[in-house]
Every structure is written in structure tokens, then in C-alpha cells.
Image (tube, rainbow, N blue to C red):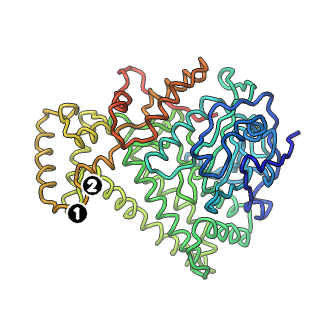
């Protein structure tokens, strides 16, 4: 039986405002005990920012808390109910293998969800064992921390604990639990669940909770639900633009994997694009390319439309009028996304001012990159440091012409506090979590118990805009192979 223990020394300062919502939104329960928990990785900088004591978390009691064998004082473990469209098909879902311990109040008074992922079965497990394998949890740690360093809103990873137990997937694998930190785990699917199976009043309670938690500046008047929709659209437009600008492919953009807070969540079959191609898909289950790199903005808009539908009863007492308000708000998403993306692409090319022809200049480069299978990240890095011979495009007639147009464009800019090159250095990462590097780190850790490869990778990924000599080794491309790289949903 999971025990409760005072943990003042650990620095836990837990609340659980979600537990004050209607009980139909969640199920209260305790994590399942694990045999012999062992701390594999602790995010010390994140722990400190949360007000947690690093030494205490590494103690026997601290590890027991991170494994779910002990419940810190103030915690109220629960599994959240939600629904969602999975590859376009609606289904009842929920936290099948994750439990919300509570909300940590950090020294600045900010609130963060603390969730244990892989902590055992819940009523929403749908036949699953509620456990997680070590490899996928390490992947989430690496990618989420890399995204944070890139300046992209994301959930983060506080710790990974192995359970001392094996889980069965295709083979026998070591089990692990990830402690995930988020502004919240409110999903589009949370609203879909309440809209489908709850009452309008429960929907109003959830919307008011989302407003209070994530958008406290929105006036508490009758138009606040439209303002909520508009605010969520704004955050998602900014988020997916940031994904596109670094070549990140989420892999499984179901509506339950989209957050109200605008954070990237659920790092399953995610990966980063090497050669530029909008049709790039890595996920083994995305056989139709629904969530391909180039489709991500459109899918975000589709998901937002599903979220907007849940709010219609709150937007207006007349459903048809509410639907019109929702549609009007959603129709603004493409332009918001495009504006974010265009500003980001200008920055990647050192363009400080705005000209109408900028978009054709950008599209011209991307078209060449696709034609010549040029690496996305390395192309922009080569342009940043004027190392044209490092580019796959170098020497081609179309690039020579494009380069002249780009240089002429830069010459028309007035002097600014930030030089074009500095803007490019700040906008183009030296490296990304290359898929082959991530796989090498996971193989060393899972197969050989060697975590040094992962530690070195995390170190260079922690400052992606440093452009250090050491990072250059991590920007090299994988050896060519006849088998395309594939990722799989983390289990």
C-alpha cells in the first residue's frame, strides 16, 4: 500500500486545485507500488526552480516519492478523464498510465502540475498495464529538455526512476516512471470529455478554471469564453510555428495531445527532420501522413475547431449564434500562424525589416532544399556563418541566383541594434536532437546501462544557440541507409 509521509525536507509545497472540480472529471486513486525503485536521472536545475531539495529527492524517501511508493504531504493523486480524436476518430480516453500527484507551488508562487507517468493502471487504462518502458521515458526526457532549451513551450521532465520490474511489449523491457512537470494537463480532450458526457454547467466550471489558471488577465464577463478561445488559438499559432521553424515533428497530434496552456505534450513518436521535405513522417502508425511535418499547421487548426465546438454552449445562449462566434475565431488561426512563421523565417535569414517579396524569397529557398534534399538545420547554420561550401545546395545555378537575391535583400536594410548575423545566430540552432544521436543514447542506456552517452547529448543540447566547436560533432548527419527511420508510440 502506498504510504503518506511528511516531506518538508524535500521542498514539496503541493496543492491540487483540480481535485476541487466535479468528481466526474477524474478518479482519485493511489499509484501502484513498485518493487525496487532506483533514481536514474534527476533534473537538478528544474528541481531547484520548483523549490525542491536536490539532496532530499535523491534519498531513499525522495526516490520512493518519485516512484509513487510514498505520497508527499499535500498530494492528492488522481487520474484525469478526457476524450479525443485519435487520427480523426473520437474516443473516450483518460490518464491510463499517469497520475497527477498535485500542483507544486514554486518559490515565486507559480503553479506546476506534478505527474507520474508509468505509475500503474487507472480506470482509463483500456486494458493496458499502466506501466512504461525505460526507453520511451528517456526519449521524452531528452526531447522535452531539448525543446525547452530551444525556447519552445513544453512540458518538462523532473526525474526518471526505474521500477525494478520488467514489462512486456514486443519483448521484455525494463520498467520506468517519468515525473512530468507542466503548467497544467488541461487538454483539448478534457473539454471534449465534459462537452460529450457532462453538463453545460460542468463545462462552465471547467472553462472558468482554465481561465483562472492560464489566462487570469481575461475579464470575468459574459464574453470571457470567447476570449478563452481566442487566447488558446493565439498560443497554438505561436507554438506550431516554433515547431516548424526547427523542423520538429510531433508525430501524434490527436486532440488529447494538445494543451490549453500551449505547451508541447506527449513525446511519443516525435522526431526532428533532417532533409527538408514537408511530407516527412517518422511515426510507424501514421501510414497516411496525417501528422506529417507539412500538415502540422492544418491539423492544429482542425484540432482547434474541435476545441471551439466544445465551447459553443458557453459562447451564446443560441447555439447557431455561438457556432458563428466559434467559426469566426477559428477562421483567424491560419493568418495568426502564418504571421508567426513568417516572422520566424525572416529572423532565420537575418531579415529585420519587412518587404512583400520576403515570402517568395523564403519559399524559393525551401523549394531548393526539398529538391536537393538539403538538411534543414545545417542549411540555415551554413548561411548564418557564410560557410556555403558546407551546403548541399552549393554550386547549383538556382542557389547562386537565390543567394544573390538574399544578399541584395540584406543590403537594403537599415542598421539595427542587432546585426543580421547575430539575429541568425539567435534564431538558428547549432544542433537539434538528431534521431541517430537519440537512438544511440537510448541504446547505450537501456542495453548496456551506460548513461554517459545521454548525459553528453543532454549537455550539448542545453545551449543550442551557443554554436560551440563541440556542438559541431553533434550536427553531422547519420550514415545513409536503405531503411527509413521510424519512431513508435511510447509504451
Residue 290 seen by the camera = no
Q: Residue furthest right?
A: 1
Report the residue at 24% width, 33% height from top. Answer: 372
Query: Which quadrant of the figure has residue 179?
Result: top right
Q: Is residue 343 above or below residue 477?
A: below
314 sits to left or right of 22: left
Earlier along the polypeptide chain: callout 1 or callout 2? 2
Label 2 environment density (alpha carbons within 10 Å; few <14, some 14–19, many ≥20)? many
Secondary structure type for disc 2 = helix
Tags 1 and 2 touching, CB below 8 Å: yes
Residue 85 at x, y = what percent? 59, 51
Residue 422 at x, y = what percent? 27, 50
Report the residue at 43% width, 38% height from top. Answer: 272
Distance CA(mark 1)–CA(mark 2): 8 Å
Q: Residue furthest top?
A: 448
Query: What is the number of callouts on the image?
Result: 2
Secondary structure type for disc 1 = loop
Residue 405 seen by the camera = yes
280 sits to left or right of 458: left
Residue 453 at x, y = what percent? 50, 25
Which quadrant would the C terminus be assigned to in this image?
Answer: top right
Label 1 environment density (alpha carbons within 10 Å; few <14, some 14–19, many ≥20)? few
Q: Is residue 385 above or below residue 232?
A: above
Report the residue at 55% width, 32% height from top. Answer: 488
Report the residue at 59% width, 65% height from top. Answer: 214
Judging by the rendered image, the residue that carries numbered circle 2 is: 346
Which quadrant would the N terminus be assigned to in this image?
Answer: top right
Q: Nearer the viewer, residue 206 or 440?
A: 440
- Disc on res. 201: none
- Disc on res. 354: 1
Residue 219 at x, y = what percent? 57, 79
Amino acid at each position: 500500500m502506498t504510504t503518506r509521509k511528511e516531506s518538508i525536507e524535500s521542498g514539496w509545497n503541493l496543492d491540487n486545485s483540480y481535485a476541487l472540480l466535479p468528481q466526474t472529471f477524474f478518479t482519485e486513486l493511489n499509484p501502484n507500488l513498485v518493487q525496487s525503485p532506483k533514481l536514474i536521472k534527476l533534473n537538478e536545475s528544474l528541481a531547484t526552480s520548483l523549490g525542491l531539495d536536490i539532496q532530499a529527492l535523491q534519498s531513499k524517501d525522495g526516490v520512493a516519492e518519485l516512484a509513487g511508493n510514498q505520497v508527499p504531504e499535500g498530494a492528492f493523486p488522481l487520474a484525469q478523464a478526457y476524450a479525443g480524436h485519435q487520427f480523426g476518430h473520437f474516443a473516450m480516453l483518460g490518464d491510463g498510465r499517469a497520475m497527477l500527484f498535485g500542483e507544486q507551488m514554486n518559490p515565486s508562487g507559480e503553479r506546476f502540475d506534478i505527474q507520474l507517468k508509468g505509475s500503474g493502471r487507472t480506470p482509463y487504462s483500456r486494458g493496458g498495464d499502466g506501466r512504461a518502458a525505460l526507453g520511451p521515458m528517456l526519449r521524452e526526457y531528452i526531447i522535452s529538455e531539448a525543446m525547452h532549451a530551444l525556447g519552445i513551450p513544453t512540458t518538462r521532465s523532473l526525474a526518471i526512476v526505474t521500477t525494478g520490474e520488467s514489462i512486456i511489449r514486443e519483448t521484455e523491457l525494463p520498467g520506468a516512471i517519468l515525473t512530468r512537470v507542466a503548467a497544467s494537463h488541461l487538454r483539448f480532450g478534457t473539454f471534449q470529455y465534459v462537452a460529450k458526457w457532462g453538463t453545460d454547467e460542468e463545462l462552465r466550471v471547467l472553462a472558468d478554471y482554465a481561465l483562472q489558471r492560464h489566462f487570469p488577465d481575461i475579464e470575468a464577463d459574459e464574453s470571457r469564453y470567447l476570449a478563452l478561445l481566442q487566447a488558446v488559438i493565439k498560443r497554438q499559432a505561436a507554438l506550431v510555428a516554433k515547431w516548424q521553424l526547427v523542423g520538429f515533428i510531433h508525430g501524434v497530434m490527436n486532440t488529447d495531445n494538445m494543451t490549453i496552456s500551449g505547451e508541447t505534450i506527449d513525446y511519443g513518436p516525435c522526431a526532428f527532420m533532417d532533409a527538408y521535405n514537408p511530407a516527412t513522417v517518422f511515426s510507424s502508425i501514421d501510414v497516411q501522413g496525417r501528422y506529417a511535418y507539412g500538415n502540422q499547421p492544418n491539423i492544429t487548426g482542425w484540432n482547434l475547431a474541435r476545441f471551439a465546438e466544445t465551447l459553443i454552449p458557453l459562447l451564446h445562449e443560441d447555439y447557431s449564434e455561438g457556432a458563428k462566434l466559434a467559426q469566426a475565431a477559428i477562421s483567424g488561426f491560419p493568418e495568426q500562424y502564418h504571421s508567426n512563421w513568417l516572422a520566424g523565417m525572416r529572423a532565420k535569414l537575418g531579415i529585420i525589416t519587412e518587404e512583400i517579396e520576403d515570402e517568395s524569397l523564403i519559399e524559393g529557398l525551401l523549394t531548393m532544399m526539398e529538391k536537393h534534399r538539403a538538411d534543414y538545420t545545417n542549411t540555415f547554420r551554413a548561411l548564418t556563418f557564410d560557410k556555403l561550401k558546407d551546403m548541399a545546395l552549393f554550386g547549383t545555378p538556382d542557389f547562386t541566383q537565390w543567394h544573390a537575391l538574399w544578399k541584395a535583400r540584406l543590403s537594403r536594410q537599415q542598421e539595427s541594434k542587432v546585426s543580421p548575423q547575430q539575429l541568425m545566430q539567435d534564431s538558428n540552432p547549432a544542433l537539434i536532437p538528431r534521431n541517430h544521436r537519440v537512438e544511440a543514447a537510448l541504446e547505450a542506456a537501456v542495453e548496456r546501462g551506460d548513461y554517459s552517452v545521454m548525459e553528453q547529448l543532454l549537455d550539448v543540447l542545453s545551449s543550442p544557440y551557443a554554436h560551440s566547436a563541440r556542438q559541431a560533432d553533434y550536427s553531422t548527419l547519420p550514415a545513409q541507409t536503405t531503411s527509413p527511420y521510424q519512431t513508435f508510440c511510447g509504451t
